[in-house]
Image (cartoon, rainbow, N blue to C red):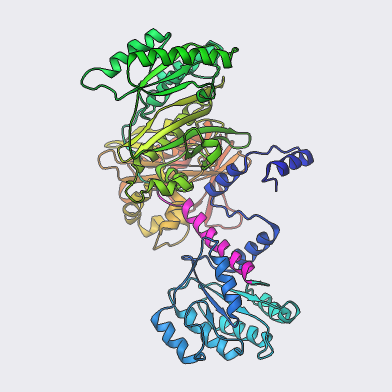
Amino acid sequence: AGRSETASRAAASHTGALAGVDAVYDAAFARAGLLRVDNLSDLFGAAQTLARLNPLSSDRLAILTNGGGAGVLAVDSLSNTDAKLGTLSEESLAALNEVLPANWSKANPVDIIGDAGPERYEAALDILFADKGFDAILVMNCPTGLASSKEAAEAVVSRVSSWHNRKKPLLAAWLGGAAASEGAELFEASAIPTFTNPSEAVSAFNHLVRHRKAQSQSTRVPPAEAEGFAPDRGTVHTLIEGALEQGRTLLTEVEAKSVLSAYGIATVPSEVARSPHAAADIARKLLRGPNAADGVAVKILSPHITHKSDVGGVRLNLASPHEVRQASNAMMEEATRLRPDARIDGVVVQPMIRRRDAHELILGLADDPIFGPVILFGAGGTAVEVVSDKALGLPPLDRMLAADLIHATRIGALLRGYRDKPAVDFEALETALVRLSYLASDFPQIRELDINPLLSDPSGAIALDARVRVVSAPPVAPGGNPRFAIRPYPSSLVTRADIAGGSIDIRPIKPQDEVLYPAFLARITAADVRRRFFGAFSNFDHDQISRFTQIDYARAMAFVALDPADGALLGVSRLHADPDGQRAEFAILVRSDRQSAGIGRALLTTLVDYARGEGLSVLEGPVLADNTAMLRLCSSVGFVARPDLEDPGVVTLTLTL
């Protein structure tokens, strides 16, 4: 509730709750892998399908119906969702031809004709269940005077109960009000989601599709970040503090571009001219020489004018120093006339950037009262508010999340290329968004930032204009920007530890570490697996390993020990805190062939130091009583062992911090 501006005011007046921009909630829910629904009907439909049906493997639906019109309505509804209409295989077509009347639809939706009795439903359902081209089945019934809706429902329930492996979800839509009530009761008793019309059933199937997509997106492994990127934080700090000391909350355009450059975001070179004559001198240098610019742009420079075009404060394609002098003079006079309250500090002169195939985009940082810093991407230019093509995301971003942000916009499709227009350099665009995320993480003083326009084409991305608003704020804590809704990667915790025979690198775990796990687990003996997981595991798949490597740094922490020589994973220590932030459970696993070298001690002491720094009160964990090496290690660090009252084979280790 409260998605619209009017409703949000009503919610605030009723509950006193703060309301943020609804699109930010979308971004937060997507980041958490949640399925969002819009109304109470969808809420109950989603509850039915998600609680009763197995997760989907893909998004292809088979529709079985005794009414052609109902099938068409279902397809119409399906076309407005994230789901797809599956295609019958040749084998299924041949099999259906054997059991259905000659005038059946010969395609999906499978119309088995209005006089279909229970036998026809059973035969068609078995064929569709066996067809690997479908991930779920929607079976429908329209009441007729030729066959019983109840008997059709009984047949469906009978066939479904005979499928020993019910991995393929089935939904039902029994139309006809009172005529369908007996069938609906049968489905309810058999835990088969049932609906009263095609659109509700298709919407419920789409919930399964969207939930699968949300879950899979939350466990994707992002590409590795480029090594060696080191932003110039000192320059940014100096620029921000200098502006605040002068009583300014807006950086000048030149300062804003310097901030971007410090974080590796390409900008057009700009120089400040305090007078029209100085602007002409700068233009003379730009327009001459072997690397002469093809024209000059001049923009008004004022700490009080945010949108330069509102006061005629942008002049483009100036071809000579004389034109630059005239344009600068006229611009400064016009700005003074329209904004007599504004201080005019001169103009900014820069070379024209001409890229025939470039798109004008906007990148930015905004501030939400609930979720803090938010990153914006969309179509840019002077008509940005009118076009209103944008997407929002919560930092921190990696390149995969940045790509999601780009493709969530309408202009994202154009950026892939069309007709004779080539695709843009997506890597450069994604990198710019990621570095904007780094900037937001490092400087909580930045509350608003606009890069508009940012030109993007096959050769890269470059910022032509920028605006930054800052406020006084405490410096960043070791855990990152405290205003982030999602705690960023704690790079300050990277360290090196000495062990017997050398040293190891210790750092917080990353999603990309998934690739290290197969080789690591291959060198863990069955006995060590049992000691760590209290059972036997023969196969760790992507979903399982992603739970190890993709964590919420605000609630959990895992430190990995890496071999400095080849980067191999040698061991892991982890903790997960209770919601109250007082207690946390811990665990350690060291590669079997590298034990007794001090790796476990280094990982454990690093974890204990981290827990103290986070303000936790107690660190505890269950350990098998026969795991004597672990018991000795923890005892030497100060843990106290006590028997588990429910399981004599388990000892609980506790450390008061």
| Quarter in which the C terminus is drawn | top right
Percent position of residue 132, x then y: 43, 75
Q: Is residue 478 above or below residue 334?
A: below
Magenta stretch, overall SS: helix
Q: Is residue 91 above or below residue 587?
A: below
- The question of residue 136 being in magenta is answered with no
Q: Is residue 656 above or below residue 273?
A: below
Q: Nearer the viewer, residue 378 or 508?
A: 378
Is residue 242 visible in the rendered image? The answer is no
Q: Is residue 342 above or below residue 501?
A: above
Q: How many marks?
A: 0
- The question of residue 209 being in magenta is answered with yes
Residue at image point 67% right, 86% down = 144
Percent position of residue 516, x then y: 34, 49
Q: Is residue 69 left or right of residue 265?
A: right
Percent position of residue 56, x then y: 50, 66
Residue at image point 78% right, 38% down = 13
Residue at image point 33% right, 35% down = 355
Would you identify the image quadrant in which residue 372 lies?
A: top right
Q: Is residue 294 left or right of residue 202?
A: left
Residues in magenta, as a range = 198-221
Percent position of residue 178, x then y: 76, 79
Q: Nearer the viewer, residue 464 or 256?
A: 464
